[in-house]
Image (spheres, helix red, strand yellow):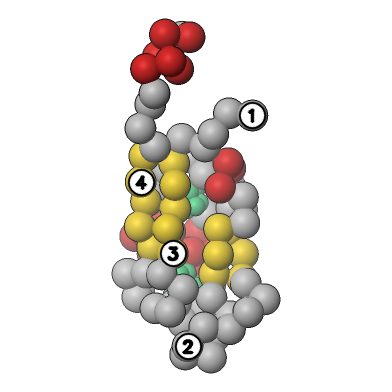
Amino acid sequence: MKAPSFVVVIDADRCKACGQCIEYCPRGALAPAERMNRLGYHPVEVKYQDKCIGCQACVIMCPEAAIELYRRPVKSREVDAD
Ligand code: SF4
Ligand code: SF4
């Protein structure tokens, strides 16, 4: 299976569960976790990493600056395959 091109990292202990990132994600990649964080909220987690298109909407909308987005490095083997 092909690895996702983008990696979303959410700092669960900063999340206040406002839902902005979920609302603005065009791919439905994010969802509330069942567990609680230190603040007593159900933090958002990345449910479908492979759906992420790297649009940055979640990063921009998060009022707590809890989300970081990384582009996964392309391995030389994958470049050769193109
Ligand atoms: S970067 Fe865009 S597609 Fe990826 S999780 Fe955030 S809002 Fe969704
Ligand atoms: S926008 Fe930020 S604070 Fe709000 S639910 Fe998403 S990660 Fe949590």
Q: Amino acid at mark 1?
A: Met
Q: Quadrant of the N terminus?
A: top right
Residue drawn where x is 47% and y is 90% of the image: 39
Q: Residue furthest toward the right?
A: 34
Q: Nearer the viewer, mark 1 or mark 4?
A: 1
CA separation, marks 3 and 2?
Answer: 14 Å
Q: CA distance from mark 1 to mark 2?
A: 35 Å
Instruction: Assign a secondary structure to mark 3.
Output: strand
Please tell me which residue lies in front, 57 or 80. Answer: 80
Measured in 3D between alpha carbons, the distance from the residue under mark 4 to the one under mark 2, in whole angstroms, is 25 Å
Alpha-carbon span between mark 1 and mark 4: 20 Å
- Of residue 50 and residue 73, the one placed in the foreground of this image is 73
Judge whether 27 appears above or below 39 on screen. above
**Residue with the mark numbered 1:** 1
Q: Amino acid at mark 4?
A: Tyr
In what element is the residue under mark 4? strand
Circles 1 and 2: CB atoms closer than 8 Å: no
Asked if residue 23 shows in the view, the reply is no
Nearer-N-terminus badge (4/3): 3
In the image, which is nearer the foreground, mark 3 or mark 1?
1
Label 3 beta carbon within 8 A of ligand 2: yes
Q: Which residue is mark 4?
A: 70
Rounded to the nearest whole Å, what is the CA distance between mark 4 and mark 3? 11 Å
- The residue that label 3 is drawn on is 10
